[in-house]
Amino acid sequence: MIPSTLLGTATIPNNGGELRLTQRGDDFSIHLKGLRGELMNSRVHSSELALAELGCAHIQGVENTKVLVGGLGMGFTLAAALKATTMSSTVVVAELVPEVVEWNKGPLGECAGRPLDDKRKVVELGDVAALFKAKEPTYDAVLLDVDNGPEGFTHADNNNLYSLNSLLAIKQTLRPKGVLAIWSAWHDPKFTQQLKKARFKVDVKTVRAHKGKGSRHTIYLAS
């Protein structure tokens, strides 16, 4: 059995715990220290790609669009968002943990094709919620994958990101016909109702974790 090698650790702000990046052979894993386990693995990323593909479907071929990706992770959603948009577009990626950005600049970046090297990307270090405070129409698509779902799994303050007031603020940052897409490890009908209370039209998609197989994940599309 190939041993796992620890490549780096990082502290999540506000007592969110410790992230660990490990490598086993060609596979990378980011997990939380302790009992809560693996958050993402480079072998299993189809639903992260689907988040961008579904969330950006309405702007394919459209010039000068702007997309916000909340959560860099292993870079797969960022890479898919860059692929789904034109060369005149901008993709902003917000990441709470600076070390995650550095990991993606290192060997981990090869997994998603080094999207941080793309000149169209803009990296914002910090809580993605801060980018919604202006409440001005800025983005054609907002793609959120900041934890395991709307309950705020890895970072307690993420619960506020999915509150009714926050959803209303996000809605104000969307341009006309803009779409908010949210990744979740499972479907929560209560969150669908929360989105509807914010006066979004909601479509819920079920996607597989790995090329048509594996766990079923949920993408909420709110327009």
Image (cartoon, grey):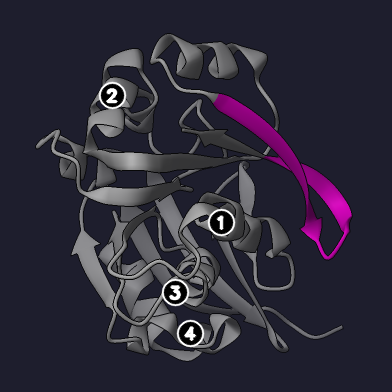
Dots 3 and 1: beta carbons under 8 Å?
no
Dots 3 and 4: beta carbons under 8 Å?
no
User: How far across and how far down the image is residue 131, in percent?
Assistant: 18, 45
**Which one is nearer the viewer's eye here, 49 or 179?**
179
Residue at numbered disc 4: 109
The amino acid type found where label 4 is placed reads Gly
User: How far across and how far down the image is residue 121, in percent?
Assistant: 29, 75
In the image, residue 201 above or below residue 61: above
The amino acid type found where label 3 is placed reads Leu
Q: Is residue 138 left or right of residue 207?
A: left
Residue at numbered disc 1: 57
Q: Which of marks 4 and 2 is in front?
A: 2
**Which one is nearer the viewer's eye here, 220 or 185?**
220
Q: Does residue 208 show up magenta in the picture?
A: yes
Q: Nearer the viewer, mark 1 or mark 4?
A: 1
Q: Tell me the CA gap for discs 3 and 4.
A: 15 Å
The amino acid type found where label 1 is placed reads Ala
N-terminal label among 4 and 2: 4
